[in-house]
Image (cartoon, rainbow, N blue to C red):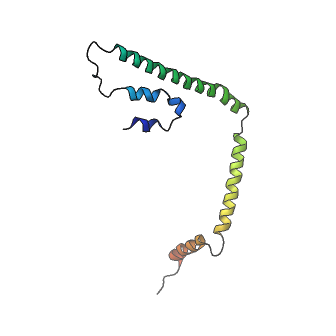
């Protein structure tokens, strides 16, 4: 599975460093000979540091959202008004839909009359 495709749906700045970290990981864990790898460990450590730094920034943004934005929305709650507007819009759409369906030549009325007549019409001899 392509790892890039899995993370493309997230915000690019939140993934900065993480993608490089994932691409830098070898598929085979026994790629280094025994006793060698000091330079590779330094690079891996830097990649981990970059990933952790970017993750820290992401978590800070999340903390800001939870501490600053959500209390604002709870103090100035608009959900009641929005729900009322949606109810009014639903009622308006129901009224318009009924008017369209109630016309004498409407396909809905024809279908209902065919169904009704097929069940309750006297049998034809």
Q: As drawn, which residue projects farthest toward the left?
A: 34
Residue nearer the viewer, 33 or 105 = 33
Left or right, 72 with respect to 125, comes to right
- The residue at 71%/48% (across/down) is 85
Which of the 4 image quadrants contains residue 37?
top left
Residue 109 position in % (x across, y down): 60, 72
Residue 56, above or below 115: above
Q: As drawn, which residue projects farthest toward the bottom?
A: 125
Residue 120 position in % (x across, y down): 53, 76
- The residue at 57%/71% (across/down) is 112
Residue 124, above or below 81: below
Q: Quadrant of the N terminus?
A: top left
Residue nearer the viewer, 63 or 119 = 63
Residue 124, above or below 25: below
Residue 110, above or below 84: below
- The residue at 26%/17% (across/down) is 33
Which of the 4 image quadrants contains residue 45?
top left
Residue 83 position in % (x across, y down): 69, 45
Residue 93 position in % (x across, y down): 67, 58
- The residue at 70%/30% (across/down) is 72
């Amino acid at each position: 599975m392509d790892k890039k495709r899995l993370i493309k749906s997230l915000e690019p700045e939140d993934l900065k460093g993480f993608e490089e970290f994932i691409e830098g990981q070898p598929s085979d864990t026994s790629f280094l000979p025994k006793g060698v790898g000091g330079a590779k460990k330094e690079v891996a450590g830097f990649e981990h540091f970059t990933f952790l730094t970017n993750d820290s920034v992401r978590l800070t943004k999340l903390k800001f959202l939870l501490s600053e934005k959500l209390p604002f929305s709870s103090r100035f709650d608009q959900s009641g008004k929005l729900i009322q507007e949606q109810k009014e819009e639903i009622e308006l759409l129901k009224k318009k839909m009924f008017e369209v369906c109630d016309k004498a030549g409407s396909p809905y009325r024809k279908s209902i009359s065919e169904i009704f007549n097929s069940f309750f019409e006297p049998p034809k001899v």
